[in-house]
Image (cartoon, rainbow, N blue to C red):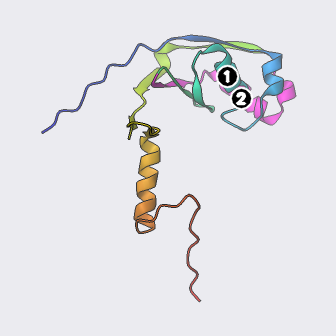
């Protein structure tokens, strides 16, 4: 039997995040990628992308790893208040602590000369489409046949 490959992951860093009035004004409510916390992360964490923020977790990719931090309680209440009425939110700061973080490497497959790499999720979606539509992969959804 093959043994599972052990992957070493770095110690997750702690990040000090400050949310200013300018960030609050430019952010859009009820959108995980453009909320005030996501915009502040882009500003304070270099190389940060694929950001998703909700009341329970803050997730992003950086340096080839996927970081998942628990959302601090104070930040979760600010996020819900921001979604209700962003004019009531005041500027604040918080720390993403390394103790409350999980780290996983980003796996890519299909990397070869001249081709873009695809994430495992995209490839599994393509396989699912092949199964569902009998080997025909399309970019547009196929409408179901209507029985008359």
The residue at the point 58 percent across, 63 percent down is 141
Callout 2 environment at 10 Å: few (<14), some (14 to 19), or many (20+)? Answer: many
Q: Residue furthest right?
A: 87
Q: Which residues are magenta?
A: 64-89
Q: Which residue is mark 2?
A: 79
Q: Is 146 on the left or on the right of 122, as rendered?
A: right
> Which image quadrant for residue 111?
top left
Q: CA distance from mark 1 to mark 2?
A: 6 Å
* Residue 94 on the magenta segment: no
Callout 1 environment at 10 Å: few (<14), some (14 to 19), or many (20+)? Answer: some
Q: Is 27 on the left or on the right of 75, as rendered?
A: right
Q: Is 12 on the left or on the right of 18, as rendered?
A: left
The residue at the point 59 percent across, 71 percent down is 143
Q: Which residue is mark 1?
A: 75
Where's the N terminus, which quadrant?
top left
Q: Are marks 1 and 2 in contact (CB under 8 Å)?
A: yes
């Amino acid at each position: 039997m093959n043994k599972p490959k052990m992957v070493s992951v770095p110690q997750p860093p702690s990040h000090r995040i400050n949310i200013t009035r300018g960030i609050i004004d430019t952010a859009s409510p009820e959108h995980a990628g453009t909320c005030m916390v996501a915009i502040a992360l882009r500003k304070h964490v270099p190389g940060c992308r694929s950001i998703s923020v909700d009341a329970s977790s803050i997730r992003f990719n950086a340096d080839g790893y996927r970081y998942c931090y628990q959302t601090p309680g104070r930040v979760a209440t600010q996020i819900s208040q921001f979604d209700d009425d962003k004019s009531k939110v005041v500027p604040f700061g918080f720390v993403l602590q390394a103790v409350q973080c999980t780290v996983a490497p980003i796996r890519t497959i299909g990397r070869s000369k001249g081709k873009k790499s695809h994430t495992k999720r995209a490839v599994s979606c393509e396989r699912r489409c092949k199964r569902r539509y009998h080997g025909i992969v399309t970019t547009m959804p196929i409408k179901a046949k209507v029985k008359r």
